Amino acid sequence: MSKADIASLKLLDERLRFLSAWTIHHANHVRDSADGLKVGGHQASCASMTAIMAALYFHALGPNDRVAVKPHAGPVLHAIHYLLGSQTLEQLKNFRGFGGMQSYPSRTKDRIPVDFSTGSVGLGVAITAFASLVQDYLTAHGLMAEEDRGRFVALIGDAELDEGNIYEAIIEGAKHDIRNCWWIVDYNRQSLDATTEERMFDRFDDIFATCGWRVVTLKNGALQRAVFARPGGKAIETWIAQCPNADYAALTYQGGAAWRARLNADLAGDKAALKIVADHDDDALARLMTNLGGHCLETLTEAFDAAQDDVPTFFIAYTIKGYGLPFAGHKDNHAGLMNPSQMAALRNSMNIAEGEEWQPLAGLGGNERPGVERLVASSRILREKRPRSFGKIEIPAIPAPEGAEQSTQAAFGRILLDLAKSGAPLADRIVTTSPDVTVSTNLGGFVNQRGLFKRRAMEDVFAKAKIPSAQKWFATNQGQHIELGIAESNLFLMLAALGLSGDLFGERLVPIGTLYDPFIARGLDSLNYACYQDARFLLVATPSGITLGREGGAHQSINPPLIALGQPGLRHYEPAFADELAVMMQEAFRLIDAPDGESTYLRLSTRSIQQVARAEDSWKNGALKGAYWLKQPTPGAEAAIVAMGALMPEALAAWEELSADIPGLGLLSVTSPDLLHRGWTAAQAGRWTGRSEPSHIETLLSDLAPRAGLVTICDAAPASLSWLGGVLGQRVAPLGVERFGQTGNLPDLYAAYRLDGAAITEAAAEILLTSS
């Protein structure tokens, strides 16, 4: 860049520092408060990032680049878009207010374009690696032109590097040879509670280089480098390199006089070095000692310009937390807020008149303004949100696999295999992925048909040697399965990136991820992160429950239905029969490509059960709403069995046995506690807003007597269904699993955990006794 452009970038850096600080200050000190609570914000964390973001957004980034901004620098991103004209003053004034700019960048809730939501630290970093892989997938499959490709940039708070998911991601990225990634660390060496351990940053070079990344350390700014070249400068360079992080932060806060005293003491006897110190007054010495690479526009732009290939690059940008603010370097500055006097002093130092704080380029003189305006106008980043595209994928009818007896897990594999063979357009959009459980979750047939995705072809050595194997896994850039290592967080981040393909790249994919049901909990933060961004995918968790008898408690899930019950953006279905599964998979595919859709979680079982004969199809609508009467009760019946999933054979057998003693006994097949609960609470809220229609579960249970009893049974925590008693005030006898499982055959386990026919009979008797 020219010197004139660098000078203009420096002014933009200052303006971003002020605007982000003022936005936070206005919310806390100027705007009326309805609740009297602190609004909060992170002025110091913003200040350490403004130069990096100025260099990126007004110089380095192109229209196809996607950025994950560190959570606490969200106000800087909004300030950038305010200068670009794509953010409104009303939104800035309503920072952290209802309907205003969000605390942390949000894809779905912010007005400006946000490529990746951040807030749960570490996840916004890691998803960029998986998004890069998705870009390679789309390009290889002819769904994306070369000129539309971009780079994926993560702006990282240094404390985020304590998050383990980042290292899981770079290991996975190394396996897939990811490219076109920049990860830029704001190395201000201060976190919420402490000063960062400097010895760890000696290791990051090795960690990232081992995983195939280029490491670029931006430690010293141009001013420091010029001084280092003078006689005595090497001693100052060495002193800076060896100064402990905590000392450096404290001296920054204390200012020029403290720097002078410390340097004079530590460099005593080195006349040339001491002369450099003496040549600077206190203000100049403070500027010199804080002229780190992450605040130097010359250093930043040169580094970005030098990394224009596709090699993944890890930039370590040394910065000062709170740079340019009165609490720069102070260990308590993380959530610190400038008081009105300090804010006024900052405003005056930038020649901004009182009352002109919101003027985009206030304080810039006539000679400075044209250069700044030209840089703002020439910014190539995307200024408005990309339109969301839905309804482009044709969803065919999904027939149920034939077979008198089958498990839902096996049926899932056969449905996918049939789709893979069908040649339907939907099949070409499907991308499957799994954390090393592809075979054991019945994805093998689909992979045999469609192949593994690798940018570089990899032959099946066993097939070439004519060694018999059920798995015929060739790998090409046309494959449709992305195999992952055993890290569930990576699975959900991969699904998140695939599920955002329509929004990020304009080409919607249909991602299907499989894992063992109990291990959802391992990646729960990443799953929540994916749903928060409205990524669309189908999650298939199998096997589930203590029905996985021989594997023991470590592989037997208990609480995932409760997780699903409280997870926004994720619809839970637990089918008992193959025809239910087929209907649910068709609906899941529709929801992926529907404006009002969401992701779907299928909880499947390895238990092969007898399928039921259907006289007609009216059950399908109820199954998609969450429940239907498998055995219709007579009007006003005194009891019903309510069952879900793999325990349906026990429920049917108990229904047959009890029907003679309990006239009109019903059997309710619950396919989604999640949807039933949503519908119930929505109906309750609707009664106060003029909508009085009953919910689906209210309609179903109203077929019974008001004081009827419900025996609920599921291979999961009993609370998954026991809440049904609160819908109409009916009594409940809940059966389910509340202890860790163990190995055993199903009769023994079902008897021990009270999931068998005898337990249902006893529960029904309990209800009838208490009603008399």
Image (spheres, helix red, strand yellow):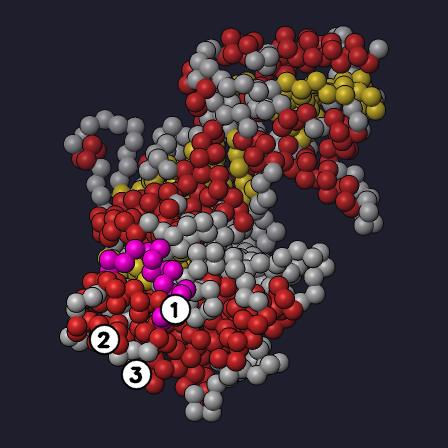
Give the number of the disc on residue 708: none
Provide the residue span drawn in magenta.
241-257
Residue 672 position in % (x across, y down): 62, 33
Quadrant of the drawing holding the C terminus: top right
Give the number of the disc on residue 255: 1
Left or right: residue 466 versus residue 93 is: left
Residue 154 position in % (x across, y down): 38, 58
Identity, as a three-letter code, of the amino acid under mark 3: Ser
Say whether residue 570 is magenta: no
Q: Residue at x 36, y 51 (%)?
A: 196
For disc 2, the neighbor class at 10 Å (few under 14, some 14 to 19, many from 20) is: some
Disc nearer the start of the sequence (1/2) = 1
Q: Is residue 476 visible?
A: no
Marks 2 and 3 sit apart, C-alpha to C-alpha, by: 28 Å
Identity, as a three-letter code, of the amino acid under mark 1: Gly
Q: Which residue is mark 3?
A: 2
